[in-house]
Every structure is written in structure tokens, then in C-alpha cells.
Amino acid sequence: MRRYLNILLMSIAMVFVACDKDDENNDDNERFFIREIYTWGGTMSVTQDDSSVFTQADVLVDVDFFDKDYLRIVMNQVKFSEKMPIQLDMTIDSIKYVVGDENLEFGGNNIVPQAMGGPFPQYTITGFTGKTKDGQIDFSMMCGKYPLSFSGKLLFASN
């Protein structure tokens, strides 16, 4: 797992490499940005209206570093309640991230998620915070009025 974290941190660090400081109009982060997608496997939990917690194991989450400053999270084939008749993919876009000494931190507020081909403003994401460290990812948010959290391990990376 340490190897995966090192790969993650090295590839993200490349985003911040500067080559030519003499050219003020040149965006070095953009020039050296390498798109990476990391897939994490873990458990998602959602607190229900009655304060019970619905838990879904074996959830796959893709973290797509599509930009030098922002990432996208896709929660694949999730259910948010036992009563939910289908599983769906939910995309949370434009999440700001920063690279720390040994981790990656990310978060955002007032993000309208996408699911089933369109926006879901009634489940606007607020208080979104997350981090990766030592091959582990953890994040939490309010999805509309529902507290949601995910915890998982890195499975693989691709570009």
C-alpha cells in the first residue's frame, strides 16, 4: 500500500512542478499536469431520517484528477437507503485539492451532484472534506440533509 501512496503523491506532486519561472504568462502547473484516475474500494454509510445508518460495502469510488487544481469523485453503483430500488453512479465535480507532506486533502461546498444523466440539486453537497494517506481514503459530506461518509483502500491507478 505504501507503494501506491508514493505513486499517488509523486504523480500529484508533478502537478506543482515549475519549469520556466521567467515567463509570467506561462502556467507551469497546466503544462506539467498528468491526468490520473485512482480507484478505491470501501464502505459507504448514510444516516437515514430515523437516525439509523445504512451501510453499503464493496463500493468502488473513482477519484479523477482531471485538472491541476480540481478532482472529480464518482461513486459507482451506490444505494443511499435499503428502500432505494436501484443503484446509481453519483458524480461530485470540481472538488478543490491540495497536496500535503504525506497526504492529499480535498473538499468543497455547495456542489450539485450528477446522477442518472442530470443534476440533483435537492442533494447538494455541503461540508465536503476528505483526505488520502498511506493508501487509505476517507471523506464525509452532507448529501442534501443526509450525512454520508466513505472509507476505503486504494485498489489501482490509471491514466
Image (cartoon, rainbow, N blue to C red):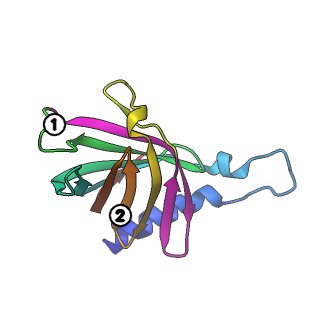
Q: Quadrant of residue 139?
A: bottom left
Give coordinates of residue 111: x percent, y percent.
Answer: 49, 42
Quadrant (top left, top right, bottom left, bottom right) of the C terminus: top left
Looking at numbered disc 1 in the image, what kind of residue is underneath it?
Answer: Met
Residue at 35%, 53% (x, y): give it.
157
Q: CA distance from mark 1 to mark 2?
A: 26 Å
The disc label shown at residue 69, or none: none
Horizontal side of residue 20 vs 6, given as left or right = right
Determine whether 94 is above or below 157 in the image. Answer: above
Q: Nearer the viewer, residue 106 or 85?
A: 85
The residue positioned farthest toward the front in the image shown: 50
Residue at 43 percent across and 70 percent down: it is 6
Amino acid, disc 2: Ile
Does residue 141 appear in this view?
Answer: yes
The residue beneath circle 2 is 137
Which residue lies at the image location 34% right of the left edge and 68% below the top edge? 135
- In this view, the residue farthest toward the top is 117
Quarter of image, res 131: bottom left
Q: How crowded is the residue under tag 1: few (<14 C-alpha within 10 Å), some, or many (20+)?
A: few
Query: Dot 2 lies on which element?
Result: strand
Predominant secondary structure in magenta?
strand
Coordinates of residue 97 in the picture (x, y in percent): 54, 57
* 1 or 2: tag closer to the N-terminus: 1
Q: Is residue 92 magenta?
A: yes
Residue occupied by mark 1: 84
Q: Position of residue 125 (x, y in %)?
A: 44, 46
- The magenta stretch is 86-109
Q: Quadrant of the N terminus?
A: bottom left
Answer with the quarter of the image where residue 40 lies.
bottom left
Residue 70, position in %: x, y? 55, 48
Point 55% across, 75% down: residue? 101
Q: Is residue 90 left or right of residue 42?
A: right
